[in-house]
């Protein structure tokens, strides 16, 4: 149980385009999902907390107009990187929290912006 | 700024060796310490959530201890196997931040 999928696993796009990443909880409902980013040789850094039916809460330094988060259902949250630039190239990973406070992670998305 | 440090960064051992690594975290406002196992191209897998000082948890050949007063946790693997090869992440959850703060992980490679 507690499986989280993430799609796509890898995406390459041109600078200026937008990219949408989906995060789904497959066998449970998640009122709260999290989006992290990891740059090479660094730790997972929380970008935002996504709450079903309400606006996401962004961490300091993360632009909410650039990283659009939508959590329209209890099993799906999406992250859209708008007008992506090479510096947005990173590994993006989502997680979903259950009542025990454990977070279950998706396998991540490698974004490369040319 | 809250800092979570893991050591060593990487570790190479032979099959059958026992190994351990360390996670250091802030000792104030402690709520929980999480351990994850992350194999390449897969999702991080939750191993333990530890909350009580002195707690010890075990899952098969993997165990973990917790010292909240001095701010460290050890993860032990007994009789390492090649399938144990992964990055082991710890994450601190403190009441003040209400979010997981991750270390950079320890990369374990077990040679057959």
Image: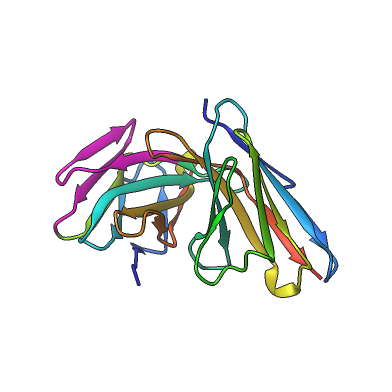
Camera-nearest residue between B107 and B3: B3
Q: Is residue B49 magenta?
A: yes
State the image coordinates of residue A57 (x, y, percent, origin top left). 53, 56
State the image coordinates of residue A63 (x, y, percent, origin top left). 62, 68
Q: Is residue A10 above or below residue B49?
A: below
State the image coordinates of residue A88 (x, y, percent, origin top left). 69, 69
Q: Is residue B83 visible?
A: yes
Relative horizontal placement of residue B61, taking residue A81 as reference (left or right):
left
What residue span does the magenta drawing correspond to? B46-69
Relative horizontal placement of residue A42, taking residue B14 as reference (left or right):
right
Q: Is residue B103 above or below residue A74?
A: below
Instruction: In the displayed orientation, state which residue is furthest to the front.
Output: A54
Camera-nearest residue between A113 and A77: A77
The structure residue drawn at horizontal position 37% and vertical position 46%, both measured from the top left corner, is: B35
Q: Of helix, strand and loop, which mostly describes the magenta segment?
A: strand
Relative horizontal placement of residue A25, taking residue A60 as reference (left or right):
right
Q: Is residue B71 magenta?
A: no
Q: Is residue A24 visible?
A: no
Q: Is residue B55 above or below residue B24?
A: above
State the image coordinates of residue B94 (x, y, percent, origin top left). 30, 55
Q: Is residue A105 above or below residue A48?
A: above
Q: How is the image coloured?
A: rainbow
The structure residue drawn at horizontal position 34% and vertical position 30%, both measured from the top left corner, is: B60
- The number of discs equals 0
The structure residue drawn at horizontal position 54% and vertical position 72%, both measured from the top left corner, is: A61
Q: Which quarter of the rendering shows the N terminus of chain B?
A: bottom left
Residue B37: image quadrant is top left
């Amino acid at each position: 149980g507690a499986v989280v999928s993430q799609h796509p696993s890898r995406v390459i796009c041109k600078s200026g385009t937008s990219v949408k990443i989906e995060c789904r909880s497959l066998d449970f409902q998640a009122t709260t999902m999290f989006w992290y980013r990891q740059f090479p040789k660094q730790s997972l850094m929380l970008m935002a907390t996504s709450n079903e039916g309400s606006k996401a809460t962004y961490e300091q330094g993360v632009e909410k107009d650039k990283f659009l988060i939508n959590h329209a259902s209890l099993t799906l949250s999406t992250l859209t990187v708008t007008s992506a630039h090479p510096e947005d190239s990173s590994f993006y990973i989502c997680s979903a929290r259950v009542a025990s406070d454990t977070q279950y992670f998706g396998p991540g998305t490698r974004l490369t912006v040319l | 700024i809250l800092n979570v440090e893991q050591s060593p960064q990487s570790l190479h051992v032979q099959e059958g060796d026992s190994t351990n690594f360390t996670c250091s975290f802030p000792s104030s406002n402690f709520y929980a310490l999480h351990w994850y196992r992350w194999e390449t191209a897969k999702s991080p897998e939750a191993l333990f959530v530890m909350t009580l000082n002195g707690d010890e948890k075990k899952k098969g050949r993997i165990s973990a201890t917790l010292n909240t007063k001095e701010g460290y946790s050890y993860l032990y693997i007994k009789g390492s196997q090649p399938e144990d090869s992964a990055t082991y992440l710890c994450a601190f959850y403190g009441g003040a931040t209400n979010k997981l703060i991750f270390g950079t992980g320890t990369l374990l490679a077990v040679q057959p």
